Image (cartoon, rainbow, N blue to C red):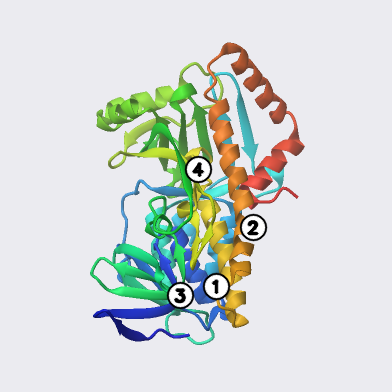
Amino acid sequence: MKRFLSTRSGLRTESFDVAIAGGGLVGASVALGLARDKLAAPLSVALVDSSLPPAKEEVFDRPTLRTSTISLKSHKWIQGLGAWKDKHATAFGDMFVYDKNQGITFDAKQDELVHLGYVVENVILRNEMYKRLRELRGKENTGATITEIDAGISEVDYTGDPKHASIVLQDGKRLSAQLIVGAEGANSVARRESEIGYWRHDYRQRAVVANVKTKDQSSTAWQRFLGKSGPVAMLPIKGGSISNVVWSTTPAEAKALTAMSDGEFLKELNLAFEEDWEGRVPPLAVEVVGKRASFPLSVSHATEYVGKRLVLVGDAAHGVHPLAGQGVNLGFADAEELVRCLAVAASTGRAIGLDEALLLKYQGRRMPENLFMTGVLHSIKSVYEWDDPSLESLRSFGVKMVDSMPLVKRAIVKYQTLGDLR
């Protein structure tokens, strides 16, 4: 169904089959997935965000702070969307995780893989998605018709019309849709104004993010657990010549780390990886590139992913600790599954907003995996915060046992990279 215009209460209303609230990585991938799937051709889709990328291609000479670790499964999804460019991503072949007592290596070669994953800057990947989305516009033999709407969302109304939900924009305009896809992240307006429950636990930690130039190039993803204050990770970007740092710590230390001089920060960073440890360490950080920032850490989950004319994806549905870089990968898996469900529904003429069985199928496939990963990451965080000597010994013994069991390590790598334990 193509969109049409109507007038209601003096406001212009634009009507669509689907309105995607939020045009970040996950929301944009839903739109692009529908635009590429021929089964979704009957659908008209609005993609709404207050900061859509400009039509002119942007050039980023300096690295940006927000990055994502892309699993092999997500890489396949993005590649299928036509939005992947190898030149923008840095692959890592192994991952080394350690605390003050024990370390463990996960190596792609040992698991017959070329890479364990990739690190990409969010803004660059998002721009590629929109570039591809705009290239598809007006072409024949494609999927859904996508309309970009550059506007903030004021409210979402699920009660005014029995056949449609509506989004009220900050400029007063109204969008009507059979189905709203809530993809605006943890503070989702679409979720908040629905009847869906939501729980959130504040970790009382902040993640400090920075980019540093290192003495030597690296193709390793590094992570060290520093006890109760949290882990620090160093991920290769820009071909490995620069590393993106994500340092989880207390609010007080985060404030100090973002305020101190570049020289002091480099000293603290190198010390965090090297102190009380005689094993392998990341290459020495020698220069801070750009600014530093921090953001609060929490874990969260919606009690349902499906409401009346609403479905949630990505951080609007679930949020996890960044220690394993799995947040966006869970979101991409949501997007892929939702596109599959909506495309099949569109091709068979089903009412996508009222077909409860269709939407519950999406929830049934995604919620168990997301809850499982949420629990795993929370447990890892908790275990590495043990500071009792006897518990530390138990943790070290466990890590040593896993490191000595290739089949167990292979299963861990397979699940983290491919989302599959079989």
Tell me the kind of residue under disc 2.
Gly
Q: Pointer 4 and pointer 3: residues touching (CB < 8 Å)?
A: no
Q: Pointer 3 and pointer 1: residues touching (CB < 8 Å)?
A: no
Residue 36: in sight, yes or no?
yes
Tell me the kind of residue under disc 4.
Val
* Residue 354 - label: 1
Q: Pointer 2 and pointer 3: residues touching (CB < 8 Å)?
A: no
Q: Position of residue 106 (x, y in %)?
A: 63, 37
Q: Pointer 2 and pointer 4: residues touching (CB < 8 Å)?
A: no
Instruction: Give whichever of discs 4 and 3 has the lower sequence position.
Output: 3
SS class, disc 2: helix
Viewer-proximal residue among 161 and 420:
161
Instruction: Give whichever of discs 2 and 4 has the lower sequence position.
Output: 4
Please identify the quarter of the rendering in which residue 284 is found: top left
Q: Which residue is mark 3?
A: 162
Of tags 4 and 3, which is closer to the observer? 3
Instruction: Give whichever of discs 3 and 1 has the lower sequence position.
Output: 3
Q: Which residue is mark 2?
A: 364
Viewer-proximal residue among 168 and 77:
168
Q: CA distance from mark 3 to mark 1?
A: 10 Å
- In the rendered image, the vertical position of residue 364 relative to residue 199, given as above or below: below
Q: Residue at x 31, y 50 (%)?
A: 62
Q: Which residue is mark 4?
A: 320
Residue 83: in sight, yes or no?
no
Of tags 1 and 2, which is closer to the observer? 1
Instruction: Give whichever of discs 2 and 3 has the lower sequence position.
Output: 3
Tell me the kind of residue under disc 3.
Pro
